Amino acid sequence: MLDFIRIACAVPPVKVADPIHNAADICGYISQADEKNVDILVLPELTLTGYTCADLFFQETLLQASIEGLKQILCCSKAHPMLTVAVGIPVVISGQMYNCCALLSDGKVRGLIPKTYLPNYSEFYERRWFSSSEDLQQKTVQPQTLGLEGDEPIPVGRDLLFTVGDGTVIGVEICEDLWTPLSPSTLMTLNGAEVILNLSASNETVGKRSYRRDLVRHQSSVCGCVYAYCSSGCTESTSDLVFSGHSLIAAGGSVLAENNNPVETDYMLLCDADLGKIRAKRRQNKSVKDAVSLYSSVEPMRKIRCSTDALRSDGTLFRYDRLPFVPADLKELTERCYSIFGIQVAGLRQRLSTIGAKAVVGVSGGLDSTLALLVAVQTMRQLGRPASDVHGVTLPCFGTSDRTYRNALELMQKLGVTVKEINIKEAILGHFRDIGHDPSVHDGTYENSQARERTQILMDYASVAGGIVVGTGDLSELALGWCTYNGDHMSMYGVNSSVPKTLISRMITVLAEDPRFADARENLLDIVDTPISPELLPPDAQGQITQQTEDLVGPYELHDFFLYHMVKHGFTPRKIYSIACRAFDGVFDQETVKKWLKQFYRRFFTQQFKRSCMPEGVKVGSVCLSPRGDWRMPSDASARIWLDEIDHLS
């Protein structure tokens, strides 16, 4: 139900031209893989014989021994029926020899896939021994003609796909097939393949490892698939070449697992891959379907059912980042923060230059308004205009703490913006008298009135200043609806609307070290350390914040995790709960995760009406809730089936 598949790449210590010895090693890896609940085991190209046999491939003795070795592996496969195995073997069909992958399960050869592209340049000389799949004139081969037992014809061809478990579709290509302009795996994914296996024998030269990695990563991205690549190890003949045993498993453009050593053999690399991500991307991205229509000559493929009834992976070997919006690597994080900041500035620059306006920012001393203010200041710099064309307005009221008030004023002063302070207490008390609200009752009316009064003043002040109100609300708040409708919910352009809360604090930390904002460094770092709060309720006797957002709506770390996987991948509450419990193990217990997951779905559905009329704002990442772009849903949709699923979680 959770859509995980466990894949292993095994690189045995091949003894060149000794299929019986090699078969024994392969059987050992089959047993190891089965013990670890692997669903698919991939072995290198021509595993049974070794890739470097050269003219020994013409020897009948070697070919017969290969079949004997295959029988040995089939016997082992019968004892491990839940495992699908891809092994490389030379096969003679109708008088021609083919470099094949034999796909096995439950003691049977489910299909033979010949290599299509045979390299015959530089150090490669494959056409001397093998024929291409293009030369194959038949769709099946009788087992007896290969020296195998059984009456059932074995499918053979480059047009084979295999289904395992819940219907997961697997395609196979061999080494050079990947290095071509139109690889078989591209055609396979157009025909529905979700997992591609590549049995390879790629020798090592300077720089080739990184190129190979990029190639596999790219193919997994453009094809929207899981791609498992397994290459021959260093026990191949070293007469002229060294084979490094490079293995890697990628999915959707990211490397999930890779062996560490530059030259290695006799090891098994395994990991879980999340097919749910692959399937979500394909549902959302219609380009694959369009490509099928465009390339009408794409040959249809045969689907062969393997014996396994279910995939065994529970996903425990798949690592989910606790903070999916925040890179763990410091260099990558810094690059992302600057990239987002640059996008925000570019968006606001275009808007201000088009209408010739100034920028008005409500500055609270909190994270969101701080980032918006930095964006506005840098925008003016790029436009060649003074920082004073940014009007920072602070609007203290009942809940404003000494700390945030001080930070707001000092930050604006150090950045050189025009500073405006408007205390709204009397305006709010007058408003309470008008509507008959008791100011001692600290309810929704008490809080929302302050938010709406601030927005009204900002809008009116923008008219006076000749500017537009730059919105400060972020992606996390929009997801939860944690904003007052027509209050802080509204602006004339939102620069933070697709930046999640968990990333904003990191962005400010990074920008605090930027020489452009050196004068404000101390305030920026203090703002990062300030508890997140709307400051709509009075502080305590010491002037400290009493109203903390995460106590009310839940930890933003959890909510951003839920948001990312719900919107980006369309995962079910059950799957999100499962992976969240694993990602936050030791941080939040299961009941806490479940509590805030239910809160997330409830608020996400009931607060859509705020997103349906949200202001324009720049998109910076792959998750965005703009009703004009990435997210469209009816405001009165029912959340019942999602909430019911959460209620039944255990």
Image (cartoon, grey):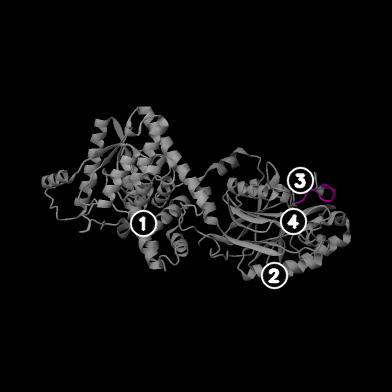
Q: Nearer the viewer, residue 463 or 45?
A: 463
**Distance in Å between CA atoms under marks 4 and 2:** 22 Å
What is the x, y in percent for residue 83?
65, 66
- The circle on residue 78 is 2
**Distance in Å between CA atoms under marks 1 and 4:** 49 Å
Region rendered in magenta: 127-138
The first of marks 4 and 3 along the sequence is 4
What is the x, y in percent for residue 288?
57, 44
Helix, strand or loop status at disc 1: helix
Q: Nearer the viewer, mark 4 or mark 2?
A: 4
**Distance in Å between CA atoms under marks 1 and 2:** 47 Å
Q: Nearer the viewer, mark 1 or mark 2?
A: 1
The answer to whether the residues at label 4 and label 3 have Cβ atoms under 8 Å apart is no
Judge whether 138 appears above or below 626 on screen: below
Q: Nearer the viewer, residue 258 or 181?
A: 258
The answer to whether residue 449 of the structure is visible from this angle is yes
Helix, strand or loop status at disc 2: helix
Q: Identity of the amino acid at label 1? A: Phe
Helix, strand or loop status at disc 3: helix
- The circle on residue 600 is 1
Q: Is residue 450 left or right of residue 126?
A: left
- The circle on residue 134 is 3
**Distance in Å between CA atoms under marks 3 and 2:** 32 Å
- The circle on residue 45 is 4
